[in-house]
């Protein structure tokens, strides 16, 4: 039972993780440290690290170009936040699967056999790619926060 569950868990867990990623990419929610355009009230909202509204800035005389900039910024925030959650969930899933395979003494080798001398190279490459992706998403998030601050301060705060 344990061996079967562990081998088929990617078929169950990965679609759930990707579904969470898709919802976070396009869903209607407040992104931590992000901005949101409330078109009905003609306001731009800034959010804190928990997604609570920190500041509401009225934008009565906004041009369509500035409105598109805010919408693109909001979309980029959602995509970057979704990518960071995706990275976190895949890391947690990989650690749990590896731990369970050791506890239950189940081999995870599938169709592709990797020789013992190449395993450290493959593990190093996987860790390096993950670290690069995490660093890239983190720096992109910081850039978006900085971009939102400059956009809001220069264009909308009197």
Image (cartoon, helix red, strand yellow):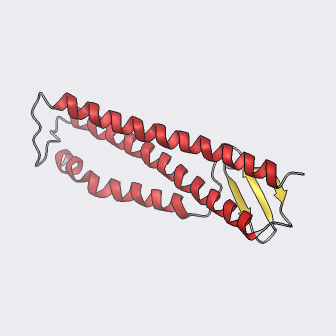
- Tell whether 31 sits left or right of 92: right
- Residue placed most toward the observer, 60 or 32: 60
Report which quarter residue 131 is drawn in.
top left
- Residue placed most toward the observer, 123 or 102: 123
Compared to residue 120, the image places residue 7 above or below, namely: below
Residue drawn at x 21%, y 30% is: 121
Compared to residue 135, the image places residue 59 above or below, namely: below
Residue drawn at x 12%, y 27% is: 117
Residue drawn at x 17%, y 34% is: 105
> Residue 86 at x, y = what percent?
44, 49
- Residue placed most toward the observer, 84 or 148: 148
> Residue 16 at x, y = what percent?
39, 58
Q: How many marks?
A: 0
Res. 50 in view: no
> Residue 82 at x, y = what percent?
51, 52
Report which quarter residue 57 is drawn in.
bottom right
Residue drawn at x 57%, y 63% is: 27
Res. 104 in view: yes
**Residue furthest right in the image:** 158
> Residue 55 at x, y = what percent?
80, 50
- Tell whether 137 sits left or right of 39: left
């Amino acid at each position: 039972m344990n061996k079967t569950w562990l081998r088929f868990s990617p078929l169950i867990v990965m679609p759930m993780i990707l579904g969470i990623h898709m919802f976070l990419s396009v869903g209607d929610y407040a992104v931590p440290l992000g901005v949101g355009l409330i078109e009905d009230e003609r306001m731009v909202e800034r959010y804190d690290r928990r997604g609570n509204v920190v500041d509401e800035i009225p934008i009565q005389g906004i041009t369509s170009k500035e409105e598109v900039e805010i919408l693109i910024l909001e979309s980029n925030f959602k995509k970057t936040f979704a990518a960071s959650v995706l990275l976190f969930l895949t890391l947690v899933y990989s650690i749990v699967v590896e731990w369970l395979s050791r506890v239950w003494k189940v081999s995870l080798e599938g169709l592709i056999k990797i020789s013992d001398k190449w395993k450290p190279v493959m593990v190093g490459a996987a860790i390096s790619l993950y670290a690069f992706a995490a660093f890239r998403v983190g720096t992109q998030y910081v850039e978006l926060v900085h971009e939102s601050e400059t956009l809001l301060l220069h264009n909308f705060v009197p």
